[in-house]
Image (tube, rainbow, N blue to C red):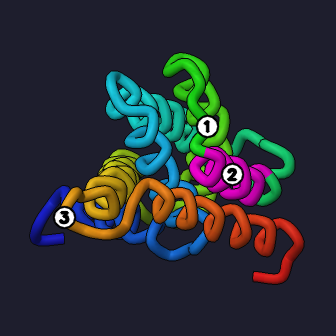
Amino acid sequence: MAHPGAEHVHGAVEGFLHPFGGLDHVLAMVAVGIFAAQLGGRALWLVPAAFVGTMAAAGALGMSGVALPHVEIGIALSVVALGAAVALNLHIPTSIAAGLAGVFAIFHGYAHGAEMPASLSGFGYAAGFICATAILHAIGIGLVVLLTRREWTASPVAVRVVGGVVAIAGAALLTGVA
């Protein structure tokens, strides 16, 4: 214990790695970024912010041991719904999109918090999974920017195809295939 406070560093690293450890989390969080980019305008930051904020609160519930039923089903359904929203190029008001992202974030955040090793710092762990989630959202936004560049032949249709693949993967997760 020569370096007091090191548990926060280890907690942050573990928390950062956690979202990358499951295909369900990666797909949903990247899809949030894609969906936000498709909506554009204020949704570009409000939808991911709603997800991150709600996820952090739900993570605290998971860390505290509060029971939340059907978490894995909620996570898989979020992948299906977000993928479908992208595939269908669903344009809804930003407030509704942010609300939906928040609902989905409850399940993801709870899972992150509930799966935190007891030996780690809750604050550090939460900081890690919040940063990782923001990065995954940014990857989704960047994917839309990359796929819709004017000098490329890819178009918004390519983004919609990605959404379809995400929805299919979510259905596979939901049915237990993946």
Secondary structure under the numbered disc 1 in the rendered image: loop
Q: With 85 as the anchor, is 172 left or right in this view?
A: right
Which of label 1 and label 3 is nearer to you?
A: 3
Whether pointer 1 and pointer 2 mark residues with C-beta atoms closer than 8 Å, the reply is yes
Q: Amino acid at mark 3?
A: Glu
Crowding at mark 2 (Cα within 10 Å: few <14, some 14-19, many 20+): many
Secondary structure under the numbered disc 3 in the rendered image: loop
Q: With 142 as the anchor, is 117 left or right in this view?
A: right
Residue 118 in percent (x, y) is at 53, 62
Of callouts 3 and 2, the N-terminal one: 2
Of callouts 1 and 2, the N-terminal one: 2
- The residue carrying mark 3 is 151
- The residue carrying mark 1 is 90
Q: Which residues are magenta?
A: 74-88
Q: Nearer the viewer, residue 158 or 41?
A: 158
Q: Amino acid at mark 2?
A: Ala
Residue 19 vs 69, above or below: the answer is: below
Residue 161 in percent (x, y) is at 57, 65
Q: Nearer the viewer, residue 18 or 63?
A: 18
Crowding at mark 1 (Cα within 10 Å: few <14, some 14-19, many 20+): some
Which of label 3 and label 2 is nearer to you?
A: 3
Instruction: Please tell me which residue is depicted at 55% across the width and 57% down the height of the picture.
Output: 160
- The residue carrying mark 2 is 84
Q: Which corner quadrant holds the C terminus?
A: bottom right
Q: Nearer the viewer, residue 18 or 124?
A: 18
Crowding at mark 3 (Cα within 10 Å: few <14, some 14-19, many 20+): few
Of callouts 1 and 3, the N-terminal one: 1
